[in-house]
Image (tube, grey):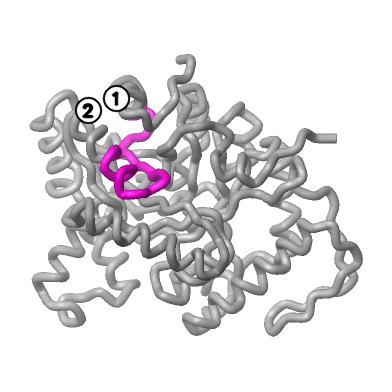
Amino acid sequence: MPPNRSLRDRTAMNNNNAFKLGLFGANCSSGRAVTKIPERWSGGWDDNLTLAKMADDAGIDFLLPIARWKGYGGDTDYQGSTLETVTWATGLLAATKAITVFGTMHAPLFHPVIAAKQFVTADHIGQGRFGVNVVVGWNEDEFDMFGVKQRDHDDRYAYGQEWLDAIKMLWSDAEDFEFDGQFIKLRAVRAKPKPFGGSRPMLMNAGISPVGRAFALRNCDAFFTNVRGSDSLDALATHVEAVKSEARQYGRDIDVYTVGVITCRATGAEAQEYYRHVIVENADWSAVDSILAKRKITPEAVGAEEFARLRKHQANGMGGLPIVGDPDFVAQQLGNLSRAGLRGAGLSFINYAEELPFFCAEILPRLERLGLRERVAR
């Protein structure tokens, strides 16, 4: 029998780090930086495997992939080459010891019986270190590849709710059960084995709309929210508390995370210079415009000034919070996120494997001194 693995242990990622750190988007070519520079991230398997082992040894808490099926075009075909996330996760779980690895799953594209079995298989390979990022999708041209029509916005989440309810039943002790939903109908269903250690994988979601946010708060253990560089610490703390308060209305206690883009160098001037080189001077602007067009963001729709702001924001890590500076500044910014009540952050780099060693050597000890991280043997 596998050892018990409580859901609390899973959501804590099996450690006592007060502020969780993860790597976000490494399964995609170029990662999350829409740039043309030659040293941009490959997204290939060998680089991902090297990165995962490095992160595991350093005590990084989680790896979070992006489910992408088709690139955004532009000069680099941004995110045009990607590794499927659940099979990616199983490979990395087999090669690591402590880190939590998520799979990101488009609910409308995978039958729940198949998805539940995939998740359980990954969970057993990782001995309880697998998590699920549930998404309902928004890229119409990706769904066209599958011959699947996107539902209206609110119906996407209604389907996602049924899908997740079915998944949880498949993970439960129920046998030969029937599921008679509006969208999903299952007959005489059984699924073995069950998730590792007697509890289910950790669930996360990043719904932005009110309907999407309600879906996350009803169902998930972690909710990802956007943070803008202009947000004050007090404003961010108010936002985080509002999310937690809303979750309590559903009788749930949820952890709130965000995503950030790290550009850290020995001095702030070096960091700013490299950031400008990557994100301004060498951005793949044609890919940026393609991404914005898919979201119906044009100068005519939002105005020229707002379009220019969003265009610059999109080039930087697909809209993540830019954290650019020396180690003291980066550690301080991450500390501020924790002080505002955030549980952690999924981070991206221009080139993850090249930049992570400096981050671990310089930032992690500073976070340890702030009481946000535990020291690990390195």
* Vertical arrangement, residue 218 with respect to residue 103, above or below: below
Q: Are marks 1 and 2 in contact (CB under 8 Å)?
A: yes
Dot 1: few (<14), some (14–19), or many (≥20) neighbours within 10 Å? some
Q: Which residue is mark 2?
A: 327
The number of numbered discs placed on residues in the rendered structure image is 2
On screen, residue 291 versus residue 3, left or right, reads left
Q: Looking at the image, which is closer to me, 277 or 37?
A: 277
Q: Is residue 56 magenta?
A: no
- The answer to whether one can see residue 141 in this image is no
Q: Which residue is mark 1?
A: 366
Query: At 86% from the left edge and 66% from the top edge, which residue is drawn?
Result: 189
- The answer to whether one can see residue 278 in this image is yes
Q: Is residue 349 magenta?
A: yes
Give x and y (percent) for residue 18: 43, 36
Give x and y (percent) for residue 271: 15, 33
Q: Which residues are magenta?
A: 334-356
